[in-house]
Amino acid sequence: MNEKLDTGAGRSIGAILIDNGRLTPDAAERILKLQKEQGLRFGDAAIQLGLLTEADIQQALSRQYDYPYLMPGDERVSEEVVAAFKPFSPIVEQLRAVRSQLMLRWFDADVGHKTLAVVSAGRAEGRSFTAANLAVVFSQLGERTLLIDADLRNPSQHGFFRLPNKLGLSSLLAGRAELAEAVTRIPGLIDLSVLPAGATPPNPQELLARPVFNALMATAAGQYDIVIVDTPAGAETADAQTIAARTRGAVVVARKDLSSAPALQAFVTSLQHSGVAVVGAVLNNG
């Protein structure tokens, strides 16, 4: 399930664009002719002729260098997953900086650190947005990445990645499905897979506390390089602490002018008392 798919690595920009249907062979010949006559780069010649846009060129370059992202208007993924569509934007640069810190401070296969919870004290603080986009930027690094939606009360990852939500984590925890059945590989993002939350159960806290959740995390860590776990709001239930205790590490998300400092501090303290390493924090400005 984690085999590498064919990418554009090693192929010319023109070949990639022809294969993607963005360019006809005749148009490519016109570009090559102008490129030779004026000593231009292929992309500059194509833009000068009005045959391609800068977005087309960037997309082809991403394929050529095995750095996948999606074109605007691709409805397979919500535009809220900004890292999938605008990899060169300031917000994604910040996410990549977070990724770099996490690679240095936490993720280490040699010591078994492959799973990480994304947590926040309250709702509407950007926790699920951060989890989704962090998963994308890790996958763009070439890491086999699994994003798990463990918010069994108010799930959102299936909406971000336009997935059905009947089969998911709740199905696995109830013993009604296996990991391979419930995981979906995201088209166009190569190394990213998503396990949605599944149908909302009447007893999420009890399901998450079952030993099967520990076994699931161990299985996922054996199959993927990076496992990112979205969680419910920590101040409302004990779910987030239970999940983070299984991942052993957490990134805390807060929102400027919304998050309560005392609630956030109390939540972080509760995580630390549960033996969870708080390995970073993300402050959302929006």
Image (cartoon, rainbow, N blue to C red):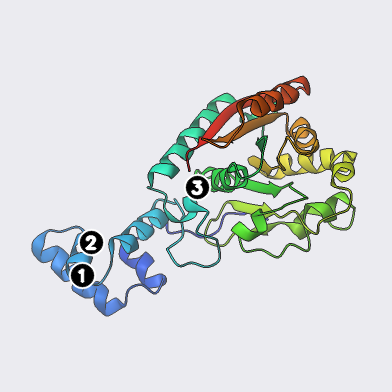
Q: In the displayed structure, does residue 96 sit left or right of residue 90? A: right
Callout 2: SS: helix
Q: Where is residue 224? Give x, y as percent.
A: 66, 44
Tell me the distance, in whole angstroms, between the alpha carbons under discs 1 and 2.
Answer: 7 Å
Quadrant hosting residue 184: bottom right
Mark 3 or mark 1: which is in front?
A: 3
Q: Where is residue 258? Give x, y as percent.
A: 57, 37
Callout 1: SS: helix
Q: Are marks 3 and 1 in contact (CB under 8 Å)?
A: no
Q: In the displayed structure, does residue 83 sit left or right of residue 31? A: right
- Residue 110 visible to the viewer: no
Tell me the distance, in whole angstroms, between the alpha carbons under discs 3 and 1.
Answer: 30 Å
Tell me the tag on residue 42.
2
The residue depicted at 76 percent of the width and 58 percent of the height is 182
Specify the amino acid type for callout 1. Ile
Q: Nearer the viewer, residue 135 or 268?
A: 268
Which circle's residue, 2 or 3, is located before the other in the chain? Answer: 2
Callout 3: SS: helix
Q: Which residue is mark 1?
A: 31
Tell me the distance, in whole angstroms, between the alpha carbons under discs 2 and 3.
Answer: 25 Å
Q: Where is residue 266? Give x, y as percent.
A: 70, 24
Which circle's residue, 1 or 2, is located before the other in the chain? Answer: 1
Q: Are marks 1 and 2 in contact (CB under 8 Å)?
A: yes
Quadrant hosting residue 45: bottom left
Q: Where is residue 265? Give x, y as percent.
A: 66, 23
Specify the amino acid type for callout 2. Phe
Tell me the tag on residue 265.
none
Tell me the tag on residue 140.
3
Specify the amino acid type for callout 3. Gln
The residue depicted at 48 percent of the width and 52 percent of the height is 82
Can you say whether 204 is above or below 168 in the image?
above
Can you say whether 276 is above or below 135 in the image?
above
